[in-house]
């Protein structure tokens, strides 16, 4: 019993439509892309807000708790909150990044993207290290971006980067 409590407390969980979903522990490729996208967001956002990985948001419904791999919250939305609410905002981040893992459930990922967008996100980046693509979702729709293309979006004009940059840390020396 004690072991069950310790294990359940040690695992990060998200709540999606009230159902507990275990947050997958990242492997090398997932972690590398997550770190790189954090750095890109921090570089591009300047003094507009805060970027963090695994930043839990407890949506106002109380039924959903999301933990995007990377989150950007603008100061405009964060500063009016209490210190406690800043730690777990009651809305989705302005920009949420979800890095795919092989064990991800496609339906759960789609629902998380929908929840982010309906609870305040301007942009959700669905990042696939395997195909080295980014599916950018906003309220108007989505578009797939590949290496060789540049990311830019009218909703967040300050966020511009080459898609290949997000995946530059995946290759090992000597890989062809």
Image (spheres, rainbow, N blue to C red):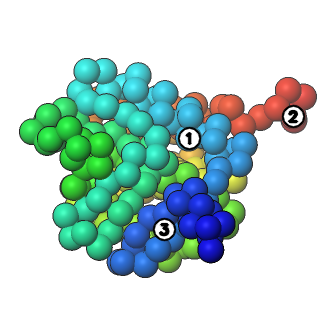
Q: CA distance from mark 1 to mark 2?
A: 21 Å
Q: Is residue 93 left or right of residue 106?
A: left
Lower sequence index among marks 3 and 1: 1
Secondary element at tag 3: helix
Q: Do tag 1 and tag 2 residues touch (Cβ < 8 Å)?
A: no
Question: What is the quadrant of residue 111 in the picture?
Answer: bottom left
Question: Which class describes the residues within 10 Å of circle 1: few (<14), some (14-19), or many (20+)?
Answer: many
The answer to whether 32 is drawn above or below residue 96 in the figure is above
Lower sequence index among marks 1 and 2: 1
Q: CA distance from mark 3 to mark 2?
A: 30 Å
The residue indicated by pointer 2 is 175
Secondary element at tag 1: helix
Residue at 72% x, 37% y is 170
Task: Tell me the number on the disc at residue 34.
Answer: 1
Residue extending furthest toward the right: 174
Q: Nearer the viewer, residue 65 or 146?
A: 65
Q: CA distance from mark 3 to mark 1?
A: 16 Å
Q: Is residue 150 left or right of residue 148?
A: left
Question: Which class describes the residues within 10 Å of circle 3: few (<14), some (14-19), or many (20+)?
Answer: some
């Amino acid at each position: 019993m004690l072991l069950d409590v310790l294990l359940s407390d040690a695992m990060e969980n998200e709540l999606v439509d009230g159902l507990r979903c275990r947050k997958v522990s990242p492997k090398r490729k997932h972690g590398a892309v997550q770190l790189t996208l954090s750095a890109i967001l921090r570089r591009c956002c300047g003094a507009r807000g805060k970027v963090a990985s695994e930043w839990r948001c407890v949506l106002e419904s109380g039924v959903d708790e999301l933990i995007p791999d990377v989150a950007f919250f603008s100061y405009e939305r964060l500063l009016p909150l209490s210190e406690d609410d800043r730690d777990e905002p009651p809305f989705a981040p302005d920009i949420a990044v979800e890095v795919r893992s092989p064990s991800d459930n496609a339906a759960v990922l789609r629902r998380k993207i929908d929840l982010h967008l309906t609870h305040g996100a301007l942009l959700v980046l669905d990042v696939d290290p395997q195909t080295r693509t980014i599916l950018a979702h906003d309220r108007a729709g989505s578009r797939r971006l590949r290496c060789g293309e540049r990311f830019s979006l009218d909703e967040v004009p300050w966020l511009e980067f080459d898609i290949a940059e997000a995946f530059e840390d995946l290759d090992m020396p000597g890989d062809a």
